[in-house]
Amino acid sequence: MQHHESPRTDPQRDQKSLVTVVGSINADIVLRVPLHPLPGETVIATSMDVHPGGKGANQAVAAARLGAAVAFVGAVGTDAYADLAISGLGEAGADVAGVVAVPGPTGQAFVTVDDRTGENSIVVVPGANARVDRNLVKRQHGLLERAAVVVIQGEIPPEAVVAASSGSARLVLNLAPVIPLDKEVIRRADPLVVNEHEARLALAIFERDAKRFDTDESIVEALLAEGIPSVVVTLGAAGAIFSSGGAPLRVPAPTVTPVDTTGAGDAFVGALSARLAAGESLEAAVKFAVRVGAFAVTRRGAQPSYPGPDDVLPEGAE
């Protein structure tokens, strides 16, 4: 396995509030279409672009562009997509010393974006992300131990999630997609971040029937009742709902005209994690993250759509 060189970082900044992301790195092949094809239908794309992506890398880039000190743990392949896939992390200033190259293809995501609504459909080929195992994570023990916040998603194998969640850092677990995990691992999340669909699948892990809960508030309360310290459910254009034990609170999203929703959820998680690592409350972090997510849908692509420190965010509940 080959390690990638890390960009220059500020040691003083790194010691304060490091966000370590353990997750997936992809090359996003983005096809814009007049409308999503139905089964058996062929449509002609209006454009094709290739960007760095992957839920893990997206979240790391979002946090780094907002000024957080970020380190990344993951894997790319040895194909032509590897350098492109990791390029966004380096450009954002993330530490990529924890990224290794493994034989075979880099992860790829095939994204179709509806030109009318900006809504996307995604098919992911895991590639090197499937090789992010317990041993790979344990070799980056230092990056995990120094972190104020560790961020994990569901695009890497469960054994890697278990290994990355076992330290003392605050764990932001974005169970996307929902993968089979032991209940005790999910109970370490503070917060568990899921969308409406994923929240119901997460309840199923705790052997709860999601059909019994007909509101977002009741689902948040049911997850909290299973021993999860805090829960954030993202609601797309409607914003988010969260609780760390009290009555769930809703945070409406700013009203924007969507261009491309790809990676907006990752922008939310990255912004949330950056603010939590800086010591903000969950409420303040969610209010900020909702605005960052709204900003991201107004631009094309995932990582290219994320705001930097000088960008003006749409006004929200903050």
Image: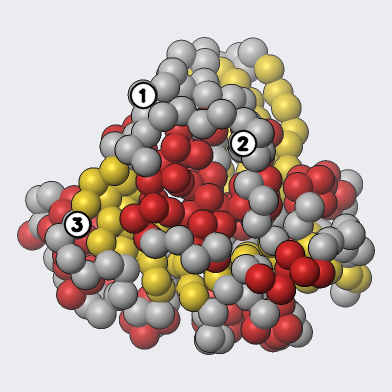
- Colour scheme: secondary structure
Q: Residue at x 36, y 85 (%)?
A: 184
Residue 146 position in % (x across, y down) = 67, 80
Q: Residue at x 82, y 63 (%)?
A: 10
Quarter where residue 277 is shown: bottom right
- Amino acid type at circle 2 is Pro
Q: Residue at x 56, y 57 (%)?
A: 274
- Amino acid type at circle 1 is Thr
Q: Which residue is mark 2?
A: 307
Q: Which residue is mark 3?
A: 248
Q: Work out how far the residue at label 3 is from the one at label 2, CA to CA, in angstroms.
A: 28 Å
Q: Which residue is mark 1?
A: 255
User: Is residue 106 among what the camera can see?
Assistant: no
Q: Is residue 303 above or below residue 119?
A: below
Quadrant where the C terminus sits is top left
Residue 67 position in % (x across, y down) = 67, 51
The reply, left or right, for residue 84 in relation to residue 51 is right
Q: If you read the primary sequence from the N terminus, does the residue marked by circle 2 or circle 1 appear first?
A: 1
Q: If you read the primary sequence from the N terminus, does the residue marked by circle 3 or circle 2 appear first?
A: 3
Residues at discs 1 and 3 in contact (Cβ within 8 Å): no
User: Is residue 43 among what the camera can see?
Assistant: yes
Q: Work out how far the residue at label 1 is from the one at label 3, CA to CA, in angstroms.
A: 22 Å
Judging depth in this view, the residue of 143 and 116 nearest the camera is 143
- Amino acid type at circle 3 is Pro
Q: Secondary structure at mark 2?
A: loop
Q: Secondary structure at mark 3?
A: loop
